[in-house]
Image (spheres, grey):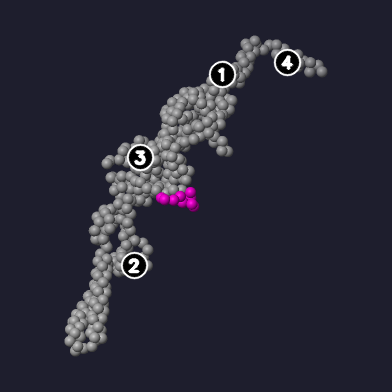
């Protein structure tokens, strides 16, 4: 017990002897540590409002458009086929080149058809001789009948034989013409001018009718003007028809308007086109109407079989409330936008969308002119949150990576 008391007194004495400067240093360190963990954030100790970009919606006239996926084809695409059967003797063109109507493309073996023609001509000569003999006999017997030398029946038989010989001669002359035509068909010529395709055949192949060949010898496409075939929905068709009946759209607007073509690489084709024809019926299997538009092709950019998007601009929305497509959110069939109120507080507003123009949507209900809509920073906000809005113009809003780029203006086609 005496030893424990001595140790206690020594410890207490040592505490008393701690210098005051050491205690002051320890107190400062404690204050600094506390300050680092509880420094104030913002004016009220909370995070600052997140920055967002907003636009003030205003009524404006905007063109509406529809895009349809189509496939190109020549103004004329003609399959070249052999009209008679034979072995291919020569190919007389450069594959993939331009050819003119009447150019010799393929030559078939002529010898079988030359032999048939010679045989038909020989038969014609024989029948001609028989006819001449029958005609002479009929004339002579008719004269003898008048003098009573021969019977009337014999004279009439000679006339009938002459008529039969004449008919046989005419039939053989038709055979000769057919053989001549077959012989000319051994020279396969271009039916139209245009660019010719590659041929799947080689010299020595059996081609033509009855040869079991389904593929044409080649295909010639007139690519001076190119047509794009695409399908529009029955709803779009009825929309255009109703607009014309109500007088809000000229009946010829859709046919005469300038169409824009977007190619597979995303580039805009430099020439505008127009709708030239449409099918006479709605396809009951797909509920669509097939339409063809025509585009000039002076540079030869377009080829048959390309896929492209046709942009149709059927009209203009007057006084529409327009917001960028990326500002519109859709969930379970409900579309909404984030509206920033006068107190910079976010309100999620349910809206109805209508026509689309470029990368923007027309809002038919749910928004009023003068309201501010968030176009950038939607992922950082929620309903009721306070934000720090930055006003931007609709045309200055950053491009949305998920939306297709707006096309460059197309130049009018050269007459």
Q: Earlier in the sequence, mark 1 or mark 2?
A: 1
Q: Which residue is mark 3?
A: 258
SS at badge 4: helix
Identify the residue shown where x is 44% and y is 42%.
241
- Within-10-Å neighbours for mark 1: few <14, some 14–19, many 20+: few
Identify the residue shown where x is 57% and y is 19%.
41
Which labelled disc corresponds to residue 11? 4
Q: Is residue 149 toward the left or the right of residue 333 in the image?
A: left
State which mark lies toward you, 1 or 4. Answer: 1
Q: Quadrant of residue 116?
A: bottom left
Image coordinates of residue 3 in percent, x first then y, are 79, 18
Identify the residue shown where x is 50% and y is 28%.
374
Q: Quadrant of residue 28?
A: top right
Bounds of the magenta span?
A: 279-287
Secondary structure predominantly adopted by residues drawn in magenta: loop
Identity of the residue furthest to the front in this view: 147
């Amino acid at each position: 017990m005496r030893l424990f008391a001595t140790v206690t007194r020594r410890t207490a004495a040592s505490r008393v002897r701690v210098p005051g400067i050491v205690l002051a240093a320890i107190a400062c360190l404690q204050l600094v540590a506390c300050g680092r963990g509880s420094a104030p954030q913002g004016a009220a100790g909370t995070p600052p409002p997140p920055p967002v970009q907003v636009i003030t919606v205003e009524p404006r006239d905007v063109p509406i458009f529809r895009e349809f996926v189509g496939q190109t084809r020549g103004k004329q695409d003609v399959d070249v086929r052999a009209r008679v059967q034979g072995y291919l003797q020569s190919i007389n063109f450069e594959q993939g080149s331009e050819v003119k109507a009447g150019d010799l493309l393929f030559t078939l073996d002529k010898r079988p058809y030359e032999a048939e023609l010679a045989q038909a001509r020989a038969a014609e000569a024989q029948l001609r001789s028989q006819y001449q003999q029958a005609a002479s006999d009929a004339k002579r017997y008719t004269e003898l009948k008048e003098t009573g030398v021969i019977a009337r029946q014999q004279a009439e038989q000679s006339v009938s034989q002459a008529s039969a010989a004449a008919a046989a001669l005419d039939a053989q002359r038709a055979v000769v013409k057919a053989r001549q035509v077959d012989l000319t068909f051994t020279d396969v010529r271009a039916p139209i001018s245009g660019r010719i395709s590659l041929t799947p055949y080689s010299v020595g192949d059996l081609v033509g009718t009855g040869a079991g060949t389904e593929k044409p010898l080649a295909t010639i496409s007139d690519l001076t003007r190119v047509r794009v075939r695409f399908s529009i929905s029955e709803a779009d068709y009825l929309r255009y028809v109703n607009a014309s009946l109500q007088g809000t759209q000229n009946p010829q607007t859709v046919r005469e308007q300038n169409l824009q073509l977007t190619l597979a690489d995303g580039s805009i084709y430099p020439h505008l086109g127009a709708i030239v024809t449409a099918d006479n019926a709605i396809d009951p299997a797909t509920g669509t109407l097939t339409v063809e538009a025509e585009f000039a092709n002076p540079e030869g950019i377009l080829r048959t079989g390309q896929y492209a998007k046709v942009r149709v601009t059927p009209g203009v929305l007057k006084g529409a409330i327009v917001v960028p497509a990326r500002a519109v959110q859709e969930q379970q069939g409900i579309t909404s936008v984030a509206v920033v109120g006068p107190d910079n507080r976010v309100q999620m507003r349910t809206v109805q969308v209508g026509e689309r123009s470029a990368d923007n949507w027309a809002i038919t209900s749910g928004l009023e002119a003068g309201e501010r809509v968030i176009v950038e920073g939607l992922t950082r906000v929620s309903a009721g949150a306070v934000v720090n809005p930055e006003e931007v113009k609709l045309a200055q809003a950053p491009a949305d990576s998920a939306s297709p780029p707006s096309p460059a203006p197309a130049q009018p086609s050269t007459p």
